[in-house]
Amino acid sequence: MRIRISVTAIVIFSAANCFGQGGFKVVPLGVKGGGDDGNLSAYMVAPIGSTNYICLDAGTLSHGIQKAISRKAFSVSADEVLKKYIKAYFISHPHLDHLSGMIINSTDDTVKNLYGFEHCIETIKNHYFNWQSWPNMGNEGNNPALEKYNYKVLAESQLTVIDQTEMSVQAFRLSHSNPYESAAFLIKNGENYLLYFGDTGTDEVEKSNKMELVWRAVAPLVRNKTLMGILLEVSYPNDQPDRRLYGHLTPNWFMRELSNLEKLAGQESLKNLNVIVTHLKPTGNNEQTIRHQLTVANTWGLNLIFPEQGKSFELK
């Protein structure tokens, strides 16, 4: 009996060590905001020490997985990462640069859940998995439904347990060139959180309060230092006119939105906060310009992270 108790204690202790590190591992499968069809928005996320990943958007999959393997993010085959490591997809909105990798790879994938707001799910069902654009890999829609992906419609702000993972999620609607919408996903692992924004415009330009509602929800987490990071888009440099943002951010708007978060979370609450800059448009010297403009404007001491395809990092 003593031996069994000791072995059990060791197992429990190991599991606690494994999943109690209080953070997330992020593997960027694609980081660009269009233009580079081998490197489009897709981020695998799991608790540190776990292989139960979700994929936040899925613009690029197979090429990104291969890149991640070459950069030592995974020590298994690409087939195993796709079929076994990715437990679910969270699609912020149905633009091709956020889901084309999932569509193309769906014929080789395994059964899993596909989460999104109702408009996103309906667009995927009616315009992609419809036997005209692509075979119907969903569990609903045009016959025959091959039932590869199970549609899971998210309710705004409601906490949803993510099947086959240690995580749960709350989803928030975003304005992406009003009246079109996108989504933000707040991922919870134990007492720790990670916030992912799909494409979004600033409230002031979009004439909405969508980002304010997200900031109000996460301000206590920022204050308590339990928000491990924010993945937020910047698509254009500051010289892009507001009328041509089409539901995206510039460095100026990016920082003004984070200023709104600081007002809610408290002075100096953003110092050392991990903010991952996503969705840079790879046109001309946009990327270099955006990096410079963000760095100059970073007066709060944010830990700005510019992700690279296939290069994993931890947030803790």
Image: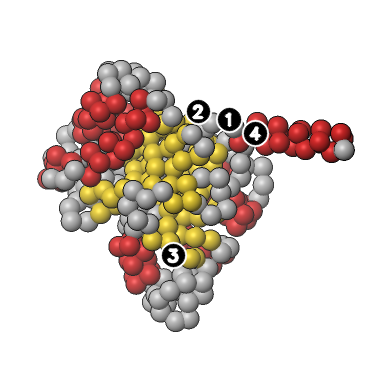
Pinpoint residue 235: horizontal percent, then vertical percent.
28, 41
Query: Where does label 3 land, which residue?
Result: 151
Q: Are marks 3 and 4 in contact (CB under 8 Å)?
A: no
Pinpoint residue 244: horizontal percent, then vertical percent.
15, 46
Which dot, 1 or 4, sits closer to the camera?
Answer: 4
Q: Is the residue 297 above or below the residue 152 in the image?
A: above
Nearer the N terminus, badge 3 or badge 4?
4
Tag 1: amino acid: Gln
> How packed is label 4: few (under 14 Cα within 10 Å), some, or many (20 or more)?
few
Res 306 seen here = no
Q: Is the residue 284 above or below the residue 100 in the image?
A: above
Residue in the foreground of this view, choosing between 220 and 69: 220
Point out which mark residue 316 bears. 2
Name the secondary structure under disc 1.
loop
Nearer the N terminus, badge 2 or badge 1?
1
Nearer the N terminus, badge 2 or badge 4?
4
> How packed is label 2: few (under 14 Cα within 10 Å), some, or many (20 or more)?
some
**What is the CA distance from the residue labelled 1 to the residue labelled 3?**
32 Å
Q: Are marks 2 and 3 in contact (CB under 8 Å)?
A: no
Q: Do the residues labelled 2 and 1 touch (CB within 8 Å)?
A: yes
Pinpoint residue 54: horizontal percent, then vertical percent.
50, 49
Query: Where does label 4 land, which residue?
Result: 16
**What is the CA distance from the residue labelled 1 to the residue labelled 4?**
8 Å
**Residue located at (23% from left, 50% from top):** 176
| Left or right, 14 with reference to 46 | right
Tag 3: amino acid: Tyr
Query: Where does label 1 land, which residue?
Result: 21
Name the secondary structure under disc 2.
loop
**Residue located at (44% from left, 81% from top):** 143
> How packed is label 1: few (under 14 Cα within 10 Å), some, or many (20 or more)?
some
Name the secondary structure under disc 3.
strand
Q: Colour scheme in the image? A: secondary structure
